[in-house]
């Protein structure tokens, strides 16, 4: 008895799976035709897509699919033709879309909804929304092109992950500088966003920068997911990027329609502007093995802070100064315009990882921003705009291309710690200022110099004015590491020259520190003289 019950249960499940599922599917598709029938007799109007307006052919199908399936179809029959799965006429089911050509063209000009029984629901110019037969020799039968079955979970029948993601944003607004769905997209911003969202690849934000990566693909070898590039006919400049969908179609952000699909192969406009195509499967990374870049990457995401020079917050030069000190023991000046005066100038073609890249006239006139070159046309910097944080960015970014000022190499500014007096002095960095201080608990200016030289067996007077009487005079142009350099303010301030126009000196606010006195607006003007003690 129990065996018979189990057999009945299995047979019941089988018959339910065979008969019930298709019934549900058919009911869903019939709801499309039933909904469309509600609008029989509604007038035809060009671009009409609402009952209170009337309907164009594409407007009717767009409205019905939105009402029944909550899916947004494009307005144009030609664009709707790019959707769904092609269906043979003999396999038509209610709810399929049927496409027709116009009077004097073979291209798609109108669309209707298959109603079953060889009927189509369509909006006509003369009678508005009607049901008409597709009998042989009739007006619509003679202009029949094809039919498509719309699958709402994959409208465009795409499989490539880039295209699956891209199709989600059809209808998103255009924005000349847009890079997100909320603000809208320009063409390159759309491509950049989709690569980041889908494949976690960081592309340049402009078309010319995107052209610089990937593998060249001929038009004959295009595959879905390839990136298409188009140019300005007059200048030859690359202005537009798009994703290749297949069958001559592309998806891109259009000025007039936002994110949309179009057949570029059938368009003389786009064919005349075609520049080339790239297959992008990876993006050259920055040099993460370089110790300087490795250190800089630790602070990605740290917020921008005006005057900031610690991991709690950085401004641009505070960031470069901190990273160079931590990674290489190189002490840069504090302001971007001062760092600009350090090291040696470098041509763009000769740029190397770790070089400082400078920009002018950003938030103020003159040199006003700096970042660290990280390889593969990218830099790491503390950005004060939009993101307001430490980030990587391409040098091909339009804004930074316009503001580019130059490059300086500063890796040669290393402290010569093989010289004992320099090593002793730099070991005391960050010891605080203390009036009358002569020990590592705190120093004044003379106490610091006296203490350092005492560590190498040389006894000097207590104060700078008396140190001026020791050793031999040295011209500024002949300075060597270990020489004493003097500055004149309210008193004579001694410092130790450590090379590359840098001094170790005690600051009231920051204690023992390294300063490039030549670029300093404070120390440079009060230079007095130098003496060689060693």
Image (cartoon, rainbow, N blue to C red):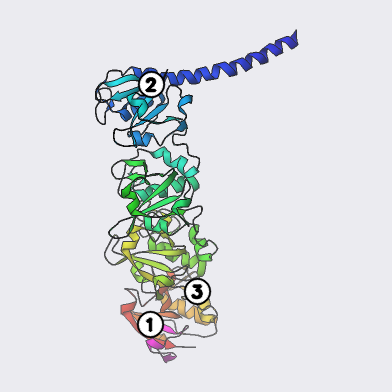
Horizontal and vertical percent position of residue 175: 30, 46
Relative to residue 265, is residue 442 drawn left or right? right
The image quadrant that residue 313 belongs to is: bottom left
Of residues 146 and 153, the one drawn nearer to the viewer in this rendering: 146
Q: Nearer the viewer, mark 3 or mark 2?
A: 2
Horizontal and vertical percent position of residue 431: 47, 69
Of residues 331 and 94, the one drawn nearer to the viewer in this rendering: 94
Horizontal and vertical percent position of residue 380: 44, 60
Q: Which mark is residue 135?
A: 2
Q: Tell me the SS state at disc 2.
A: loop
Q: Residue at x 26, y 28 (%)?
A: 48
Q: State whether residue 313 appears in this view.
A: no
> For mark 3, what is the residue?
426
Q: How far is the residue under mark 3 from the one under mark 2? A: 95 Å
Q: State whether residue 164 appears in this view.
A: yes
Query: Quadrant location of the N terminus?
Result: top right
Q: Which mark is residue 381?
A: none
Residue 483, magenta (yes or no) = yes
User: Mark 1 packing: few (<14 Cα in 10 Å), some, or many (20+)?
Assistant: many
> For mark 1, what is the residue?
486
Relative to residue 460, is residue 207 drawn left or right? left
The image quadrant that residue 446 belongs to is: bottom left
Which portion, as a residue range, is magenta?
469-486
């Amino acid at each position: 008895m129990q065996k018979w019950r189990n057999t009945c249960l299995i047979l019941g499940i089988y018959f339910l799976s065979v008969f019930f599922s298709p019934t549900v599917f058919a009911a869903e598709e019939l709801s499309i035709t039933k909904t469309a029938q509600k609008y029989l007799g509604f007038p035809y109007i060009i671009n009409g897509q609402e009952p209170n307006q009337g309907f164009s052919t594409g407007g009717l199908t767009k409205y019905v699919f939105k009402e029944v399936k909550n899916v947004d179809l494009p307005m144009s029959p030609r664009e709707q033709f790019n959707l769904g799965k092609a269906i043979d006429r003999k396999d038509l089911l209610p709810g399929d879309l049927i496409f027709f050509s116009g009077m004097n063209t073979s291209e798609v000009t109108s669309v209707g909804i298959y109603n079953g029984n060889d009927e189509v629901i369509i909006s006509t110019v003369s009678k508005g929304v009607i049901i008409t037969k597709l009998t042989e020799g009739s007006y619509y039968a003679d202009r029949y092109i094809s039919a498509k079955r719309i699958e709402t979970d994959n409208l465009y029948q795409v499989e490539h992950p880039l295209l699956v993601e891209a199709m989600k944003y059809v209808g998103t607004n255009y924005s000349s500088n847009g890079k997100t769905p909320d603000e809208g997209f320009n063409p390159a911003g759309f491509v950049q966003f989709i690569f980041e969202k889908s494949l976690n690849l960081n592309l340049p934000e402009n078309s010319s920068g995107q052209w610089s990566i990937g593998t060249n693909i001929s038009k004959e070898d295009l595959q879905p997911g390839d990136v298409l590039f188009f140019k300005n006919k007059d200048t030859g400049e690359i202005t537009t990027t798009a994703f290749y969908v297949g069958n001559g179609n592309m998806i891109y952000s259009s000025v007039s329609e936002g994110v949309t699909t179009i057949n570029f192969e059938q368009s003389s406009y786009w064919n005349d502007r075609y520049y080339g195509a790239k297959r992008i499967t990876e993006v050259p990374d920055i040099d993460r093995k370089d110790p300087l870049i490795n250190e800089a990457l630790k602070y990605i995401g740290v917020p921008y802070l005006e005057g900031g020079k610690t991991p709690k917050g950085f401004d641009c030069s505070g960031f470069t100064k901190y990273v160079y000190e931590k990674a290489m023991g190189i002490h840069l000046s504090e302001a971007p315009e001062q760092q600009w005066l350090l090291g040696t100038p470098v041509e763009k073609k000769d740029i190397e990882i770790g070089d400082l890249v400078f920009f002018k006239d950003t938030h103020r006139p003159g040199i006003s921003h700096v970042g660290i070159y990280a390889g593969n046309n990218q830099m790491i910097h503390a950005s004060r705009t939009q993101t307001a944080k430490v980030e990587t960015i391409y040098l091909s970014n339009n804004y930074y291309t316009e503001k580019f000022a130059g490059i300086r190499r500063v890796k040669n500014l290393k402290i010569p710690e093989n010289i004992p007096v320099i090593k002793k002095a730099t070991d005391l960095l960050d010891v605080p200022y203390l009036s009358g201080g002569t020990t590592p608990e705190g120093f004044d200016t003379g106490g610091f110099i006296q203490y350092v030289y005492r560590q190498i067996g040389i006894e000097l007077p207590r104060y700078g004015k008396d140190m001026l009487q020791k050793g031999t005079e040295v011209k500024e142009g002949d300075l060597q590491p270990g020489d004493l350099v003097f500055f004149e303010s309210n008193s004579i301030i001694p410092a130790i020259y450590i090379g590359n126009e840098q001094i170790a000196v005690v600051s009231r606010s920051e204690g023992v520190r390294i300063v490039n006195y030549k670029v300093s607006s404070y120390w440079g003007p009060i230079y007095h003289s130098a003496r060689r003690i060693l």
